[in-house]
Amino acid sequence: MKATRNQYLLDADDVPTHWYNILADVDIPTADVRRARPAAAEQGNGVSAPNIPLSMYRSSVGKDRFVEIPHEVREQYQRWRPTPLVRAYALERALDTPAHIYYKYEGTNGAGSHKLNSALAQVYFYKKAGAKELTTGTGAGQWGTALAMAAQAFDLDCTAFMVRCSFDQKPYRRVMMELNGARVVPSPSPITKAGLGVLESTPDSSGSLAIANAEALEHARSLECGRFAVGSGENHVLLHQTVIGEEALRQLELAGEFPDVVIAAMGAGSNFAGLAFPFHREKLRTGAGTRLVAVEPEACPKLTRGRYAWDYNDFSGTTPMTKMYTLGHTFVPPGMHAGGLRYHGSAPLVSALYDSGAIEAVAYGQNTVFEAGALFARAEKLIPAPESAHAVRAAVDEAMRARAERRATVILFNVSGHGLLDLSAYDQYLAGGLSDHAVPAEQIAASLAALPGQSHAGAMS
Amino acid sequence: MKATRNQYLLDADDVPTHWYNILADVDIPTADVRRARPAAAEQGNGVSAPNIPLSMYRSSVGKDRFVEIPHEVREQYQRWRPTPLVRAYALERALDTPAHIYYKYEGTNGAGSHKLNSALAQVYFYKKAGAKELTTGTGAGQWGTALAMAAQAFDLDCTAFMVRCSFDQKPYRRVMMELNGARVVPSPSPITKAGLGVLESTPDSSGSLAIANAEALEHARSLECGRFAVGSGENHVLLHQTVIGEEALRQLELAGEFPDVVIAAMGAGSNFAGLAFPFHREKLRTGAGTRLVAVEPEACPKLTRGRYAWDYNDFSGTTPMTKMYTLGHTFVPPGMHAGGLRYHGSAPLVSALYDSGAIEAVAYGQNTVFEAGALFARAEKLIPAPESAHAVRAAVDEAMRARAERRATVILFNVSGHGLLDLSAYDQYLAGGLSDHAVPAEQIAASLAALPGQSHAGAMS
């Protein structure tokens, strides 16, 4: 039912009962998934991959269209879901566009982003599989915050290895993790061999996500009942996020609309998939011409400038390989504010869809992204996270096109989180101090040449 | 209707159509109001008080029980109101209490606090009275952010004089103001005589709210159509905030409950009045024994340790006098994190009710307040502003008493805003670095002795 003038709100009873598994509807060769499969729990420790519970794993590689959300997880979802779908009337007026602009807002929970959708599900399955502590690596801390909150909700311990420079310079999410009882360790740390190794050679290392993840993996293996959890990319994470799109479908139905274009920011892919996959299913069912657009930063343009190839998920090349759109695991994106979009690769499921032409991709530079984010903030009184501002940019461009073409295009995008802990980035934007970080072609050519199975000569020359 | 498992949500149509004017129901001598009355608009400039529009002034000193909310203001409210009323099941479990704990949450709007309720109303009335620009002084920026956002919504200019040390050290709300098109001037500034005077004697002054307000007043007077707006204390501000309590009444009705105790943090009084006044009316109507509790910091205990006397609103003693509970306008509270509660006085309406015994007051130290805030954050996944954490502390104590007495006490309190921009304060609390700032009796005695009309000998001796 409609609960405010511009919001389409659903009841707690309307929280989806099932996640949507896109493997039921698209023909993605199993090998593309299987070789990416993390070593399952029963293989024991000592492997260079997370051990994920079989129950969670199976549901994300099978062909069942709908996977039931466990009662305990759905009950947690109901603490803040369904999230609002908002008709952006003020933005429409600001743009003087005939387009109907809708956004789904995932920042209303305590962690402030969509990450909590998967964190709660993962913690539930890990706990059921016997885990007592979860570990993870985290940069600015969006995922770490969600995991800490979820672990606290299910009474598990949580240790987050936080990249040292974020730990020192952006302490806000560290505090949120600590408020939720998590242990936050600045990485590199002396409590793991991986960390010690780095500290010995570089005592003042500012750390990296690759190092933090390596520490988190090692620490999990050192614990009797510890597991390493990841926040995006894997099939099961994409599956959990489909609650976003399922709700949006239902809410747009209340509004009497179906989108012409669905837009979401693209890091490793769970945010994009979460909104877009259910609409892909409906497209297939109804033959609608809806476009699905993934938005990435020009600083890390894996879909628009990368290659569909087998690659590692981490810088050090210790994970299993994944068939995905990638810039090469040795690609180091320039420093930028949308930390959640700095991943060199992309989820295998999103990659396969992109390869098949089922989805589109577009890349934007930082300044134009923050310009759209600031415009949105002024109009809608909601400051989007820098990651989400990428989707805003694309939505604004679609709305301007609708104006030029005098068409009442229906636009749906996802504000995956709020930007209240990213105000220093907006400050830099307002002061004119942001770089667009266009990546030179040579840098991409070099990291692509270093893909596994490629001649390494190219990268070396 | 109930929209989630633990929230009582209303429709946009249920946004109150009227504010509640408590003067219709309590016998507060008009003189107590009149001498506090700011010089009205028609008196022209050159007086040491804000000029408030007659339409806004009249409705807040009359005897009409209900004052219609202008259509344009109500339409703005409907962008985020009604705000949720939440049954704090998780907190109840954490405390193992039979109490039913409800909180009203005012942090869902873009400004992050209840301040927007009055900012929108004031901007509307000032604009109708011909104002083109509003000015204000702001410390950490909660009120300034709300005013900037409201001015932007009604297309007025806004200049906020922000205390220099906050401007330099806590830039987040400055960025939010700037994102909403406001000009933010660090105070003391060279653009006013008041600021210049301070800068001449103290070039590196870190500023104060008194100086910032003096600058904002002077700047407003220098503009042809400029007005100075205040965020609390005045009758009209309390009036605007009653939308909080009116909604809460209706929501508790949906829950089938009436509170045994109503709790809110007390700065100058608009937050407390906004929640409590409508419940006071219902108490009078039904004879219910509901207690109304204002919570103040031990660092600024005007109700619990101050005096009911005529006093100035500002440090420099240039405003008209107000009959109020006060620690004396020369009282300088110790630095603390709940900046919104650092005012030496209190709203005349709240003061009169307190004097009559109709409401209670309690004071807490910083550590116990943050302890409750952290407990609430863990349980409810919502970090309360330090101001709001004062109400949480009192609610937790009531719930513990209910447990000891084995009574299903119904507790209602107000989370006036979120604490996402106050995480450094929680960080200090977790690190054990907070002071409780108990105020020595001598300090209070000295500032009370310096009240206008008192012998000044006491303060000097």
Image (cartoon, coloured by chain):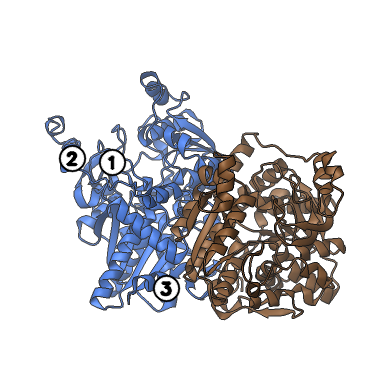
Chain colours: A blue, B brown
Chain under label 3? A
- Could you say which quadrant of the image residue B83 lies in? bottom right
| Disc 1 versus disc 2: nearer the observer | 1
The residue that disc 3 covers is A89
Give the SS element for disc 1. Answer: loop
Q: Mark 2 points at which residue?
A: A448
Q: Give the structural element (helix, strand or loop) at label 2.
A: helix
Q: Which amino acid does label 1 sit on?
A: Pro
Say the numbered circle drawn on residue A197.
none
Q: What residue type is labelled 2?
A: Leu
Whether residue A128 is visible to the viewer of this picture, yes or no, is no
Q: How far is the residue under mark 1 from the one under mark 3? A: 36 Å
Q: Disc 2 to disc 3, how far (Cα)?
A: 44 Å
Left or right of A185: which side holds B243? right
Left/right placement of residue A457 relative to residue B425 reads left
Q: Can residue A6 be seen in this view?
A: yes
Q: Are callouts 1 and 3 both on one chain?
A: yes
Q: Can you give x and y, in whole percent of width and height, for residue A48 in the image?
A: 35, 33
Which residue in the protein does label 1 denote? A333
Q: How many marks?
A: 3
Q: Where is residue A68 in the image (x, y as percent from the top left)?
A: 46, 59
Mark 1 and mark 2 lie on one chain; the one further toward the N terminus is 1
Sequence-earlier tag: 2 or 3? 3
Instruction: Output the chain of dot 1.
Output: A
| Residues marked 1 and 2 touching at CB (< 8 Å) | no
State left or right for residue B262 relative to residue A458.
Answer: right
Which is more N-terminal, label 3 or label 1? 3
Q: Do marks 2 and 3 both belong to one polypeptide chain?
A: yes
